[in-house]
Amino acid sequence: MARKRILITGAAGFLGSHLCDRFVQEDFHVIAMDNLITGDLRNIEHLFKLENFEFYHHDVSNYVHIPGQLDYILHFASPASPIDYLKIPIQTLKVGSLGTHNLLGLAKAKNARMLIASTSEVYGDPNCNPQPEEYWGNVNPVGPRGVYDEAKRFQEAITMAYHTFHGVETRIVRIFNTYGPRMRLNDGRVLPAFIGQAIRGEDLTVFGDGSQTRSFCYVDDLIEGIFRLLFSDYSYPVNIGNPDEITILEFGEEIIKLTGTTQKLVLRPLPTDDPRQRRPDITKARKLLNWEPKVSRAEGLKITYEYFKSLPTDVIEKIEH
Ligand code: NAD
Ligand code: UDP
């Protein structure tokens, strides 16, 4: 039987590259697409020799053309870390809006099923904890994070519209903070920031008083959740994340213990509109997908730390702030 063909956008990024690995292993024909604005070809170079993998260097905010049959689209292209989307705000808005529109058009033309990578950021600075899918969010549209949050909210709205008005088969995953190998050490997100600082022998920078919370999900658990959602028959948003919530201060202490660094935690100003709390309600994922995270933070952090330590020295020393 001919292989199913799947287009993965943002394929050279952290999550996109893990999705490429998974679908190649499942014997799909993977068409990977990326403009490399925040991604790195080294994340997928091991796949280039395979006959069921191909790569297109392309910006999906421009018209997307794929020859031949297409069965699935996973739209993961978008800057994802606060320092990235603050540096390239217009591209962030475009890939969430124009990029999503282009890919929905492609899905409609090819009769393909499309899953979009949404985010816990659609909840903004939430007034309830944990956050269920029914919560509409508390987002500042004109604050610095608005370019990402509103692009993702628009992305969900246009995806639902294509589903309702054009009958396109769509899936929406709301991803909560995910970590693991292939994150960029200097992308500014808290986990690579802390581990990078520990490895370089610098103090760990806690923003604000560190009482804000996050809930960190290991990448393998997330990929499994996405896989199950894609093959489910549910078109409304589903949270995928690990509900094990921790303050950033406690998280910093965990990283100090893990890395054995003698450096300390230092307080720095809290960025504007930084969410106070974040924890997924995963009742839906449990019920609909029979999914829940399996990897504890202790296990996941250990694997991720080993990965960062194995990087070449020039990568570890490079900081972009
Ligand atoms: P990443 O920066 O590692 O990967 C994003 C990839 O998209 C990069 O390779 C980048 O070059 C590519 N890209 C960006 N704009 C593009 C464009 N216009 N055309 C083609 N390629 C483009 O980030 P990530 O953490 O892997 O995030 C992937 C997706 O998951 C994003 O949509 C993000 O919003 C979403 N997400 C991630 C998390 C997380 O914790 N990692 C949480 C919520 C949502
Ligand atoms: N953070 C921090 N020190 C850093 C980087 C981030 O204390 O060096 C904080 C940040 O203010 C936020 C939390 O860690 O409260 C998670 O930040 P991240 O950028 O990883 O993700 P997001 O805010 O998008 O959840």
Image (spheres, grey):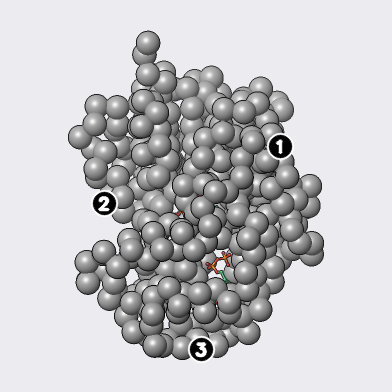
Residue 219 in view (yes/no): yes
Amino acid type assigned to the residue bearing label 1 in the image: Lys
Asked whether the beta carbons under mark 2 and mark 1 sit within 8 Å of each other, the answer is no
Percent from the top left, x then y, of residue 257?
A: 45, 77
Q: Residue at x 52, y 61 (%)?
A: 297
Percent from the top left, x then y, of residue 134?
A: 79, 47
Figure check: 135 above or below 26: below
Q: Earlier in the sequence, mark 3 or mark 1?
A: 3
- The 10 Å Cα crowd at callout 3, few under 14, some 14 to 19, many 20 or more, is some
Figure check: 120 above or below 249: above
Q: Residue at x 32, y 61 (%)?
A: 307
Residue 270 in view (yes/no): no
Percent from the top left, x then y, of residue 31?
A: 36, 32
Q: Nearer the viewer, residue 282 or 163?
A: 282
Label 3 – label 2 distance at C-alpha = 33 Å
Point out the image quarter for the N terminus: top left
Residue marked by disc 3 = 266
Q: Secondary structure at mark 2?
A: helix
Label 3 – label 1 distance at C-alpha = 42 Å
Report the disc number at residue 42.
2
Q: Residue at x 49, y 27 (%)?
A: 72
